Image (cartoon, rainbow, N blue to C red):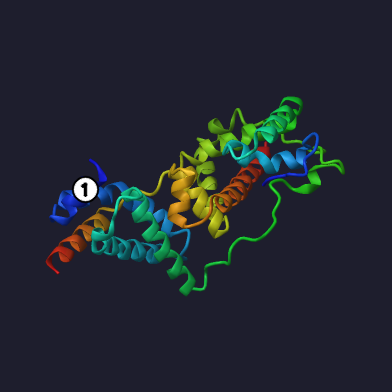
Amino acid sequence: MRLPTLRRDIVCRQAVELVTDYLEGALSRRDTRRFEAHLQACDGCEEYVRQVKMTIRVLGYVEPDDLAPETRQGLIELYRQFLEA
Amino acid sequence: MSDDDLVRRLRSGDESAFAELVDAYQSSMLRLAQTFVSSRALAEEVTQDTWLAVLKGLDRFEGRSSLKTWIFRILANRARSTGAREQRTSPVDVSNEAAVDRRRFDDGGVWSDPPAHWSDEIVERLSSGPLVAKVRAAIGELPEGQRAVVTLRDLEGLSSKEVCDVLEISEANQRVLLHRGRSRIRARFEDELAKR
């Protein structure tokens, strides 16, 4: 979310909406500077960003279910039928 | 094994090439399909249809995106239209939801109820079994678009460009959905970890 009207400092309520753009490198250089300056001065937002980063890390641990052998076999069967068709 | 080699082997009837692809992608495809349709059985059907479409469409694979992205895009399209037939698919997410409950800020927008410190202990605490289940549940509760983006970006590890290719959405839309999805999951973790 871009905040073009942001003239001076970022407040916390805005900062939490900028986290993803910040992490994605989608903020302008000026907004990046303001965002980082805010983090340095604000313990709550600094922790908030750390929490978002940890959230991303934890999401990366979620594995898909294992492939069931019968599903695998069924799909290989599908391939054989496709070749014959 | 490059995508070109794989495609060549698939066309020539090499079963081990197909098995390789299934082993690499089927579980992830099932997970993605489940973000769009209501049941696991239906999601399995969608993945099967996708494999058939992939095989039939091999000649049309031009290598402009990776084979994986191409397969996932076919899957997402099919899952979405199947979900739409079930009338499950919600319209585009236009809500203007806040990352954090606005009541936690004062009138000037400064934290009045700042986050407790738990980022250092989350991994440790999430490794206890029940919380892993809660992470899955939290993902399952996301609205469809957010869930699809979070699944592809943060669970599958695709790049933002790949996610845009698979879901056929703009970079800006991808970022909004990612932001809302991650914000919701963080809030769920907060609820869980605040219980002491």
Query: What amino acid type is highlighted by mark number 1?
Result: Leu
Q: Judge from the rendering whether residue A68 lies leftward or rightward of residue A39; answer left or right.
A: left
Residue lying furthest right: B107
Residue B128 placement (x, y as % from top left): 51, 36
Q: Judge from the rendering whether residue B61 lies leftward or rightward of residue A82; answer left or right.
A: right
Q: Is residue B105 above or below residue B70?
A: above
Residue B90 placement (x, y as % from top left): 56, 66
Residue B95 placement (x, y as % from top left): 67, 59
Q: How many numbered marks appear? A: 1
**Residue found 38% across the figure and 60% down from its top:** B75
Residue A24 placement (x, y as % from top left): 57, 39
Q: Judge from the rendering whether residue B73 lies leftward or rightward of residue B55; answer left or right.
A: right
Residue receiving disc 1: B6
**Residue found 76% across the figure and 29% down from its top:** A42
The one nearer the camera, B115 or B8, is B8
Q: Chain of mark 1?
A: B
Residue lying furthest top: A40
